[in-house]
Amino acid sequence: MTLALCLCLSASAQKSLYNLKFTLSEKNFVDTIAVEWTDRHLFVPVEIGGKTYRFLFDSGASQTSLYDDTPFLADCETVGFTVSHDAVAHRDTVQKVQLPPMTLGQLTLTGCQATVVHRAVRRNYDGIIGFDIVNKGLAMKIDVQAGHIILTDRHKLMAAEPGFTARYRLDHFTPAVELTPFGTYREYALFDTGFPGFYTMNRESFDRGTEKSSETLGKQIEGRAMGRWALGHGGAEQRSEVVFLALDSLLLGGFAFCDLHALTTQGDSKLGAQLLERGAVVFLPKRKRLCFQPYNGEARLVVGNRQTEKVVVPDKGRPVIGLVWERSEAFAEGLREGDVIEKVNGRAITSMADYYRFGPATGLPVKLGVRDKRGFQKTISITW
């Protein structure tokens, strides 16, 4: 769900750069805002024009975003265009607008700008709040266990919070936090609350780490396969070799996440929203620090997540198997990369919209009708 803004535009477009000139209605304040944690997404209520809308908080987005079917888009003022790139580096020129005053809790933002992106499939939220609210200078604490976020301009108050602290730097105005995935190799990974997974590693970073830590890394590789799985607004990443990882530990500011399964990707290394299920997170923008407060109160945690076994990606409007792990049930039953899904439990699937509407539920048995790369049809019965 990443939408990080670039600073270059085509000559024909009116130039509109990253903008933090919006104003805040409060000073010297602390506000606690109730949030909704659903399907590993964090939703924040936003009031605009007397109505309450549902926004996704996405730290991997540099600034607020709307969709081309957002109800109040007609009330926004067009301020130009900008070039954006998504989670897998697809680039596009998108419209930029200025929103009417928007209120989060007791805080009203006036003059906030947003990009407008196309929504291929209807989702149950109206827009995205990006990292610009933190870059504006507000400290933020996300605590999904308590069901709220805390916003404040009292930086000393939030800096006194306990926890495991790691540095972050801004990469296209979004937070990239320092991690140690294996051995002594360190990398910066985008902390992206719009990504519902736990961790994914950029393939080039993986290759650099392999050169430095080949002895410790070898046993942590579960397999390799050709495919594509990461998605952005512009579609799936390019086909390439994907490495399946079983990491002994992933270190964040001295905290160890153990027994962690992950994949490599052509996009950024990412630390995703599943982190929020393990502890509260504090952003300290003045010091560019992220503080992790584990719910278990310890210095390590066993993640024990399952390896990704199969991924469906859009291809020319159709749902296609983008990646299959060779050690999975799906592979053993004959599902292969490139298979086009044409039926789910006997229901015809003719588009990605159909797949999202009628697709299989995780953990339940499913009968797939697929057409392989040669044009042959087959039926696959597996637990999804």
Image (cartoon, helix red, strand yellow):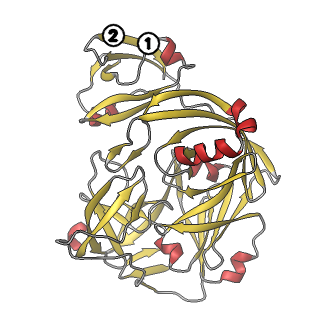
Q: Depth check: give the residue in front, 13 or 345.
A: 13
Amino acid at dot 2: Lys
Residue at image x 38%, y 75%?
A: 18
Decide if residue 217 is on the left or right side of residue 135: right
Q: Which residue is mark 1?
A: 334
Q: What is the residue that sits farthest to the bottom in this orientation? A: 27
Q: What is the residue that sits farthest to the right in this orientation? A: 298
Judged from the image, the secondary structure of the residue bearing numbered disc 1 is: loop
**Residue 123 location (% of width, % of height):** 35, 48
Labels 1 & 2 near each other (Cβ < 8 A): yes
State the count of labels.
2
Decide if residue 30 is on the left or right side of residue 51: right
Mark 1–mark 2 Cα distance, whole angstroms, equals 9 Å
Can you tell which mark lies on residue 194? none
Q: Which residue is mark 2?
A: 378
Neighbour tally class for label 1: few under 14, some 14-19, many 20 plus, Cα within 10 Å: few
**Residue 175 location (% of width, % of height):** 55, 65
Residue at image x 77%, y 64%?
A: 163
